[in-house]
Amino acid sequence: MTKWGIIGCGRIAHRFMQGLNALRDNALSASYSRRPETVDAFVAQYGGKPRSSAEELLASDIDAVYIATLPNTHADYSIKALKAGKHVLCEKPATLNLPQLEEVLSVAKASGLLFMEGMKPPFYPLYKKLKEYLQQDPIGPVGYVRAGSSVADISRDHPNFSYKLAGGALMGIGIYEAFLAVDWLGKTEEVQAMGRFSGMEIDMFSIFQTRHAGGYAQLYGGFDLHGKGDALICGTIGHVTIHKNWWNPAKATISYLDGRIVEIDEPFTTGGLNYEIEHFVELMKAGEVESSIITHEMSRQMIKMIDDARSIVGLKFIGE
Ligand SMILES: NC(=O)c1ccc[n+]([C@@H]2O[C@H](COP(=O)([O-])OP(=O)(O)OC[C@H]3O[C@@H](n4cnc5c(N)ncnc54)[C@H](OP(=O)(O)O)[C@@H]3O)[C@@H](O)[C@H]2O)c1
């Protein structure tokens, strides 16, 4: 039985519990959130014990911690959890910026414990099936990725709009696109970006394009336009469309230069976080300290891309 603690009992923590409850041999043991009423309601719904501080949670008999607060506190809680001897699955973006991530990774290395950023798309059945399929029937070397999402229906009290909590389009949405670009095109070599704040303290809409070892990516994220949410991956003899919402992938179409069209349908279950949790627990049980899918280097590449784009659009967070 893997005993979990959760820090930050908000929206994504509920979805995490949907996933956790679908898995055998995993249980929620302890929860902590900033407001006691949030923890009490969470525990009433999912069980386990409410804890009145992160320290109390980390001192309890848990194996792993899921950090589901906002990016302004991810590094601090990850470091505390690793120092307390707990494995850490931390929501995306893993930290506020690359220097913070390096700090977390050096503590993780010293502790010999598992640290993984919760970047969910590669664990979905569709994404895995697509990669397997392309092994047998390739689209040629991939040289271009285009992906984006702008969600105009989020209420203004959402943390995505909060400067203090390190919100903004690049942090909230761009990080998924950074993953896609790095996953298909490799190491980032150059970042260009434009973004507008529209009277807010965070970027409300940003576009960024990147050059990688394997080619180019064009990416966008935002909160004030109704965007599409699909992804295009182009190779020399074919292209893939991962249909919206590509970061919760369930359907893809592969179009080959010779005219063939292949559709892949792989629905996901229980909110989709179950797959990354399963992967994390397998690694933990095998004594691994790093995922081979979301590697520490990949987390570095993703946050560096967002750091560079933020610096160009002029978004600095508190303490930077
Ligand atoms: N993987 C995915 O699919 C996915 C989807 C959405 C978001 N995310 C990521 O998940 C993270 C959380 O997003 P969310 O949408 O769940 O936000 P959210 O609904 O605001 O939840 C965050 C919770 O953390 C608590 N909290 C805030 N600051 C805290 C602190 N210093 N110490 C302890 N608890 C604190 C708040 O609880 P109180 O009520 O106690 O203040 C809040 O309910 C973000 O990093 C986001 O990027 C991931």
Image (cartoon, rainbow, N blue to C red):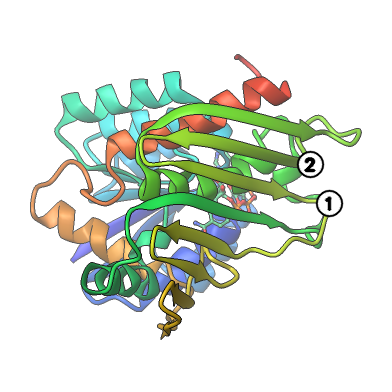
Instruction: Give the label on residue 205, or none.
Output: none
Assign a secondary structure to mark 2.
loop
Q: Amino acid at mark 2?
A: Met
Q: Is residue 104 visible?
A: yes
- 166 relative to 3 in the view: left or right: right
Disc on the earlier residue, 1 or 2: 2
Instruction: Give the label on residue 224, or none.
Output: 1
Q: Which residue is mark 2?
A: 204
Please rate how many residues cluster around mark 2, counting C-alpha atoms within 10 Å: few if below 14, some from 14 to 19, many from 20.
many
**Measuring 35% from the left and 22% from the top, which residue is drawn there?**
102
**Measuring 26% from the left and 52% from the top, which residue is drawn there?**
293
Location of residue 318 with respect to 33 vertically, above or below: above
Q: Amino acid at mark 1?
A: Asp
Q: Position of residue 275 (x, y in %)?
A: 33, 68
**Measuring 40% from the left and 43% from the top, which residue is drawn there?**
182
Residue extending farthest to the front is: 258
Question: Is the C-beta separation of discs 1 and 2 under 8 Å?
Answer: yes
Quarter of the image for the C terminus: give it: top right
> Foreground: 265 or 198?
265
- 16 relative to 89 in the view: left or right: right
Q: Is residue 317 visible?
A: no
Residue extending farthest to the left is: 286
Assign a secondary structure to mark 1.
loop
**Measuring 44% from the left and 53% from the top, which residue is drawn there?**
31
Q: Label 1, label 2: how many angstroms apart (C-alpha)?
A: 6 Å
Residue extending farthest to the right is: 199
Q: Position of residue 40 (x, y in %)?
A: 56, 60
